[in-house]
Image (cartoon, rainbow, N blue to C red):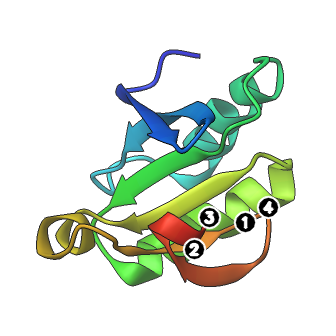
Amino acid sequence: PFPDARIHWRRDATIGSWPIEVDRATESRTAWRRKLIRYLTAQNSDPILALTTSEARATGLAHVASEVGVPLLATTLRACQDTLDPHVLDTRTRRRLPLSQT
């Protein structure tokens, strides 16, 4: 898969990276499903960070990712602009959590 961007992070002795997919609400759920299926073959265990236009859209993307079985953190672009620790929908826990707690 070729994400729109990638964030490399470090927390104490743990290092990881998140592929980032930016959704402008122009792609259908079917297109997102195909995109997420490509991540199933990748050897990356870190979740995808999906940034989108609305809470409803973030919820929809998280639902599609759960159906496909791809770990995903979904939030809005606005949430990332407004705070350094935005709340995300985590498909692994099926909860809304601050990004720092995922």
Estimate how packed mark 2 is, as few (under 14), some (14 to 19) or many (20 or more) residues with alpha carbons within 10 Å.
many
Q: In this orientation, which residue lies closer to the viewer: 72 or 12?
A: 12
Q: Report if the CB atoms under discs 2 and 1 are less than 8 Å apart.
A: yes
> What is the C-alpha distance between the residues marked 3 and 1?
10 Å
The percent coordinates of residue 92 (x first, y second) are 79, 64
Viewer-nearest of discs 4 and 1? 1
Q: Are marks 4 and 1 in contact (CB under 8 Å)?
A: yes
Q: Residue 66, labelled with which disc? A: 4
The image position of residue 49, as x and y in percent, is 49, 49
Label 1 environment density (alpha carbons within 10 Å; few <14, some 14–19, many ≥20) = many
**What residue does disc 1 label?**
91
Q: Name the residue under label 2.
A: 89
How far apart are the two marked residues, 4 and 3, measured between alpha carbons?
16 Å
The mark that comes first in sequence, 3 or 1, is 1
Image coordinates for residue 44, horizontal then vertical, percent: 72, 25
Which residue corresponds to the image point at 76% horizontal and 78% vertical from the top-left? 94
Type of residue at label 4?
Ser
Quarter assignment of residue 20? top left
Q: Earlier in the sequence, mark 4 or mark 3?
A: 4
Of mark 4 and mark 1, the one earlier in the sequence is: 4
The answer to whether 40 appears left or right of 84 in the picture is: right
For disc 3, the marked residue is 102
Question: What's under tag 3, amino acid-wise?
Answer: Thr
10 Å crowding of disc 3: few (<14), some (14-19), many (20+): some
Secondary structure type for disc 1: loop
Where disc 4 sits, the SS reads: helix
Is there a contact, CB below 8 Å, between mark 4 and mark 3?
A: no
Q: Going 45% across and 24% down the picture, which residue do you hit?
A: 3
